[in-house]
Image (spheres, rainbow, N blue to C red):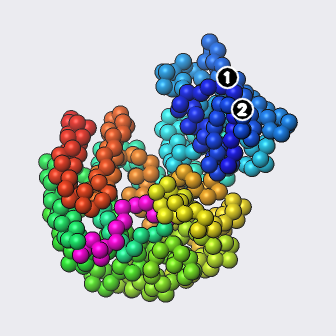
Amino acid sequence: MKAIHIKEQLKEDWHRVFNHIANLFYEDSVIQFEHEGSDMSLQFDHSTDAQHTIRTSAKLEVDGQMYTSQYAIDYSTEGTEKERNIRMKRALSHVMLDVLEQYSGMTQQWGILTGIRPTKLYHKYRKSGLDHAQIATVLKEDFRISDQKIGLMEAIVERQLKVIPDLDEIGQEISIYIGVPFCPTMCAYCTFPAYAIQSNRKAGRVDKFIDGLHIELREMGKWLTEKNMRITSIYWGGGTPTSIEAHEMDALYKTMFEAFPNPDSIREITVEAGRPDTITPEKIEVLKKWGIDRISVNPQSYTQETLKAIGRHHTVEETVEKFWLSRNSGMNNINMDLIIGLPNEGIEEFQHSLEESAKMQPESLTVHTLSFKRASEMTRNKDKYRVADRDTVGKMMEMATNWTAENGYVPYYLYRQKNILGNLENVGYCKPGEESIYNIVIMEEVQTILGIGCGASSKFIHPETGKITQFHNPKDPAAYIMTFEEAIAKKIAILDEIYSS
C-alpha cells in the first residue's frame, strides 16, 4: 500500500478519481491531505483561461526525487458546470498518471481510463463525426491510451457495426435479461446472484421463485405487447439457469414465448449453461424444442486443482464431455469462458487451457482477467489465494490475443472492472458471424435492458436523450419472492415514463 499526500484539499469526486489512478499502480493506495505518514507528495496546479484552455501540472516528490508533468487542452466552448468539472478531472488525471509512470516505470496501456466501457467512448467520438485517425489522436493524447489498445477498440467497434448495422437506432427496441439465481455451488471469485440450489430446493424457495418468475414474465409481457415492442435479444443468466430441472425450464420458455410480442423478430436467445455439471440430455432437448441453440459451457480453467480451489465441483473431463454432448445434440453456437490469473495458475496452466480450447473450437471464447470483486470469497480471504503477478498476467493476455487470431477468432466486445489484475480487460472473441448481440448492446448501452427475475438489473435508456435509469430486483430468492410484484409495478412506471410517446 502507498500513502500519497496531495497538497490541496480536493473536491470529493476528484478525490475518488485520483484514488482510482493511484490504484492502477499500488494496491489499496490511500490519498491523504496530511504529510505525516505519507510515502510521496503530489502537488497540482490548474487553471482555465478566457479562451477555455485548461492547463494542469503535477510535481511528485519521492525520497528526494522530483517528477514533473504539464498538460494543456483547448475547448471551443465554456461548457456547463458539470462538463467543466469532468474536463478538469481528466486533465489532472493526465498529469498524475504521467508522474506516477515516470516514478514507477510502469506504463498503463489504458491510460487514465478507469471505467468499464472503453468502446462506448470510441462510439461517442464516432457519432460526433470524428474519423478513426482523429479518434485515435484524442484517445492517445488526451486519455494516454496505448496504440495497441486503441487498435483493439477500433477493431471491436468496426465488428459491432458490421454485426448490428442499425446500432445507432436500436434504442427503439429492447433487450431482456432473465435471472435464475441458483448454482450447484458458489465460485470463490463470484458476486453474481448464485445460491446453492439443493438447500434452496429443500426450503421450498426454488418452486416459489419459479412461480414468481412466471408471473413476472407474463406481466412484463403484457406491457411489451401493449406497446408492440420489438425485442432484440433475450439472455437467460444467473446464477446458472440450467440448474433447475428440464421440465421447469420447458414451462418457463413456454411462458416466455406466449407472453412476449413479435417472437419471430427476436434476433437472438441465449441460455447461460455455464456450469457443465448442470447440463443433461433432457435439458438440451428442451432448448432444441424452443429453437435455442446458443449456450455457454464454461471451463474457466482446464486444471483440476484450480477448479477445486475456486469452488467449481465439476471435473475437467466433465467440461469436455458436456461440450461434445451439447455440440452433437445440435447446439450450434457455444461460448466458453477462460479466466486469466486464477489462483496458482501461470503461463503453463493457461497454455494448457488454450490447447484444450483448440480441440473444441467453440464459436466464441470469452477471455476474462481475474478481478477481486469486493464481496467475493476470494477478496475476503486474499491471503488464501495466490495469483500471478502483473507481468505474468500481461503475458497470458498476449497469449490469448495471439491464440485467438491464429484460430480464426475476432474481438467483438470488451469491458473492464475495478481491481482487475494487471489493469487489463475482458475480451469477447468469436468466429466471424457468431457474435452475441446481447453482449454488444449491454456493453455499449445503446438500448434498454429489461431485467426480469432474481438479481436482474434493469437499465432503462431513454431512446431520445440517452438518459439512464437503473432498477435492481432483489438478489436473494427469499426477498424476490416477497417483493417481485412491487418490482413489476415500479418497472412498468419507469417504462411508461420513457416510452410515453
Residue at 63%, 18% (x, y): give it.
48
Using the image, determine if residue 329 lies above or below residue 339: below
Q: Tag 1: residue type?
A: His
Compute the Cα span from label 1 to label 2.
21 Å
**SS category of the residue bearing label 1:** strand
Q: Which image quadrant for residue 235?
A: bottom left
Q: Does the magenta-highlighted stretch encompass residue 198?
A: yes
Q: Which residue is mark 1?
A: 46
Residue at 34%, 46% (x, y): give it.
459
Q: Which residue is mark 2?
A: 35
* Mark seen at residue 373: none
Q: Residue 72 location, x and y as percent?
A: 69, 26
Left or right placement of residue 118 versus residue 467 in this view: right
Q: Residue 12 location, x and y as percent?
A: 53, 31
Q: Which residues are magenta?
A: 189-202
Q: Which image quadrant for residue 22?
A: top right
Using the image, determine if residue 133 lies above or below residue 362: above
Q: Quadrant of the C terminus?
A: top left
Q: Who is closer to the viewer here, 382 or 470?
A: 382
Left or right placement of residue 34 versus residue 118 in this view: right
Q: Does the magenta-highlighted stretch encompass residue 68?
A: no
Q: Residue 321 location, x and y as percent?
A: 44, 87
Left or right placement of residue 222 versus residue 48 in this view: left
Residue at 60%, 76% (x, y): give it.
354
Outermost residue to the top: 50
Q: Residue 425 location, x and y as percent?
A: 57, 56
**Does residue 103 show up?**
yes
